[in-house]
Amino acid sequence: MFISKFSQLGARVVEHLTREPSISVSRSPYLYAVRHRNLQSLMQERFFSTTDKAINEGCKEKQKISVTFVGDGGEETTIKVPVGMSMLEAAHENDIELEGACEGSLACSTCHVIVMDMDYYNKLEDPTDEENDMLDLAFGLTETSRLGCQVIASPELDGLRLALPAATRNFAVDGYKPKPH
Amino acid sequence: MLLQFRGESDGNYYGKQRYNGYEYAAPQNQDYGGAAAAYGALGMGHQLMGCIYRALSKLFLRRSYSSFSSHPLRVCVVGSGPAGFYTAEKMLKAHQNAEVDIVDRLPTPFGLVRSGVAPDHPETKIVTNQFSRVAHNDRFSYIGNVTLGSSISLSELRDLYHVVVLAYGAESDRAFGVPGEGLSGIHSAREFVWWYNGHPDCSNLAPDLKSSDTAVVLGQGNVALDVARLLLRPTMELATTDIASSALAALNESSIRKVYLVGRRGPVQAACTAKELREILGIKDLYIHIRNVDLLTTSSDEEEMKSSRIRRRVYELLSKAASSETSGPSPGQRELHFVFFRKPDKFVESDEKSGHVAGVQLEKTVLREDEGTGIQTAVGTGQFDELSCGLVLKSIGYKSVPVDGLPFDHHKGIVPNAMGRVLSDNAEDTIQFERGLYVSGWLKRGPTGIVATNLYCAEETVASITEDVKKGDIISTNTLARPGKNGLLHVLDNRNVKVVPFSSWEKIDNEEKRLGSLVGKPREKLRSWNELLRVAMS
Ligand SMILES: Cc1cc2nc3c(=O)[nH]c(=O)nc-3n(C[C@H](O)[C@H](O)[C@H](O)COP(=O)(O)OP(=O)(O)OC[C@H]3O[C@@H](n4cnc5c(N)ncnc54)[C@H](O)[C@@H]3O)c2cc1C
Ligand SMILES: NC(=O)c1ccc[n+]([C@@H]2O[C@H](COP(=O)([O-])OP(=O)(O)OC[C@H]3O[C@@H](n4cnc5c(N)ncnc54)[C@H](OP(=O)(O)O)[C@@H]3O)[C@@H](O)[C@H]2O)c1
Ligand code: FES
């Protein structure tokens, strides 16, 4: 409930910010940090004033971790993700281009991300059979591939770096042959 | 309900005109807009009109060469399945001056997501939310109930738009070409799927599920697993899905208890994916039979599994199912039999019911490695056995159909293309492309891949279009202006084609959801052309 309100508001604020002519749309980590701070202070003003105290405090306690998404051109976007939120939701709240055709219901594989650091990959819980079944079909599968909708922010993942696979480059007309795995 | 279409970018005054229930802004005082109007009003042949508006646009060009890039890039996508919608989405994103129209022969959008994806896979259909968001972009229009090849020809479309992307899928079937294939009781999986999914072209299929307890499904891909699952799954579990009510009723009364899934190759080569396999193996109270001898692997099989994660995981699931097999089915228990290394040699006619299938004669096969490709193919051994049954579903793949004026590879069943650019038919060795003509989805790659595959496929096609636009291949001096949607609607109106805009599909959508809510289903599909069009036009 809280998360969904947060995301609605967040989306609106981000939209508002991106429309500001003075703010460029390029994706430097710095810009994202700024945007994110704006979003938070705005959120506190607008949202907390109308919400009951318990939720307010719950939110303050809510821990956030830092996650960096690396696009296929190498551009980096670092965002803060509340513990408990999936990488898919976090990406969407921050305008990061990660597809999510089935909206996180483990039926599409379009939210494929590659964990860039083996240590972090090992910190994640093992994928379930169902996640592996969808990963089978992910484009450009690697040893450290996961589905963004199944990776949930937790404190030990602070500093996580996720690569967004370059789909087009991996696509051959005669059908894609996944690399041996 | 009326649709207001966006006008040209220079902010001229637009007079409103109505066609087929669409109201759109017809540009005044513009050479090419006038040409578009004349096109429809006079009902001229498209070639002549093509000449006229090309001449007019040249005139226009001289006056406004500087505003070249601000002109709308008029794009028509044929087919509103995943390939069509992903292409539209990526085009709108990549080209801020693009106006994208999707035409579909049905009054309902989303292609196989609506008419292919199984009713018990609602999660897969969530992607229609994303497609509907695309449909509400003000540079996008859905124009349903328009068939390429009969409502409008390809050459007409190419004259009306700068870019035409064909994404009309694969709406026929591969065949075995063996005797008896035309007997009644034999259907293609495509028809059977269309039937249970309420596609208006197959709502009257009425497959015979009553005169026998056995069905044979030929092929072991995901579609084969879908149809087998629908036949075997307790109907109670289907009752809360969007399955067509007629199909639910027929399945309720079905006497089919036993399904044979027949593949010409072995368990390592089974074309299904682990997700679908896990699902069918998990059906409640289902007896599963796999012959242990079929699970023996060769070194080539081991190689294949080493290089393919899917093949390995599918094989593991099959082995596990075989090892947990009980000694035999309990009375009345439903049964699923995996039959490997068999290909149909002929279909056997019933003695009692003339013209009806009574069984399939199967030839045993062995695998031979093709020296060129390294692929293991099935070769007949001359040994035969027979499976008796009253229903056969052929699930060996879909096949695209060509339209007039379209280069087509009949052997592969696709449009010859290089990264989505359609290759011209020409005898010489030189590679030539059809200017402004592209393909995406099953028509481009052949009938394989999940919904997501079409996303990457569409990205590739859009990258090709973008490159060609940049090179100046698409909008050049003599193609600067194209009438696009306005011109298309004129032509269709003259032919009395009643088009269905997205807002009318939303009426169908609402009505289906309303009907569904009365019976505890997410939707009750309207299954006939009449009903669909009646609600759309209401
Ligand atoms: C039975 C079945 C079940 C499937 N289940 C799943 C699943 O669970 N998960 C998954 O990820 N993938 C599934 N798939 C695969 C997925 O549906 C396809 O990859 C995808 O739909 C192909 O997209 P497409 O746009 O190329 O073709 P289509 O989806 O077939 O779309 C083609 C569109 O073109 C229209 N059209 C056809 N001819 C004309 C014409 N002449 N003029 C105008 N319009 C025309 C059609 O009406 C249709 O809307 C399934 C496929 C099948 C066959
Ligand atoms: N849930 C899902 O994700 C889902 C559901 C349904 C469909 N889909 C996708 O939709 C696509 C189409 O599925 P599909 O099942 O139609 O196609 P498919 O996966 O290509 O399977 C076709 C099957 O037919 C067999 N076959 C082909 N020609 C044959 C012949 N002449 N004789 C005997 N057997 C023959 C193939 O065997 P060989 O291997 O020997 O050629 C294979 O078993 C697939 O990519 C599938 O994954 C996905
Ligand atoms: S969003 Fe579909 S599997 Fe993650």
Image (cartoon, coloured by chain):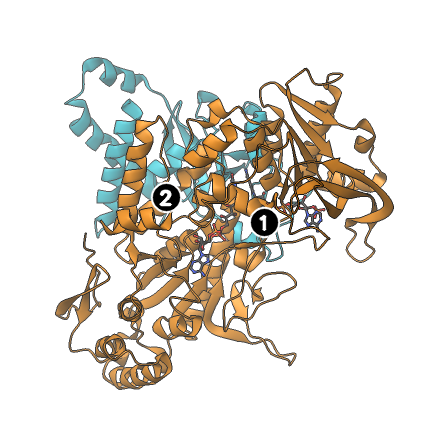
Chain colours: A cyan, B orange
Q: Does residue B237 appear left or right of residue A41 in this picture?
A: right
Residue at disc 2, secondary structure: helix
**Kind of residue at badge 2:** Gln
Between the residue at mark 2 and the residue at mark 1, the CA separation in whole angstroms equals 22 Å
> Residue at 35% of width from left, 61% of height from top?
B95
Q: Which residue corresponds to mark 2?
A: B130
The chain carrying label 1 is B
Position of A21 relative to B30 (above/below): above
Q: Label 1 CB, ligand 2: below 8 Å?
A: yes
* Residue labelled with disc 1: B448
User: Going by the picture, which residue comes out furthest to the right?
Assistant: B382
Residue at 70% x, 18% y is: B329
Examine the rendering and report whether any part of residue A24 can be seen: no
- Within the image, what quadrant is residue B393 found in? top right
> Does the residue tagged 2 have its C-beta within 8 Å of any atom of ligand 3?
no
Instruction: Find numbered disc 1 in the image and state the secondary structure of the residue it sits on.
Output: loop
Which of B273 and B350 lies nearest the eye of the viewer? B350
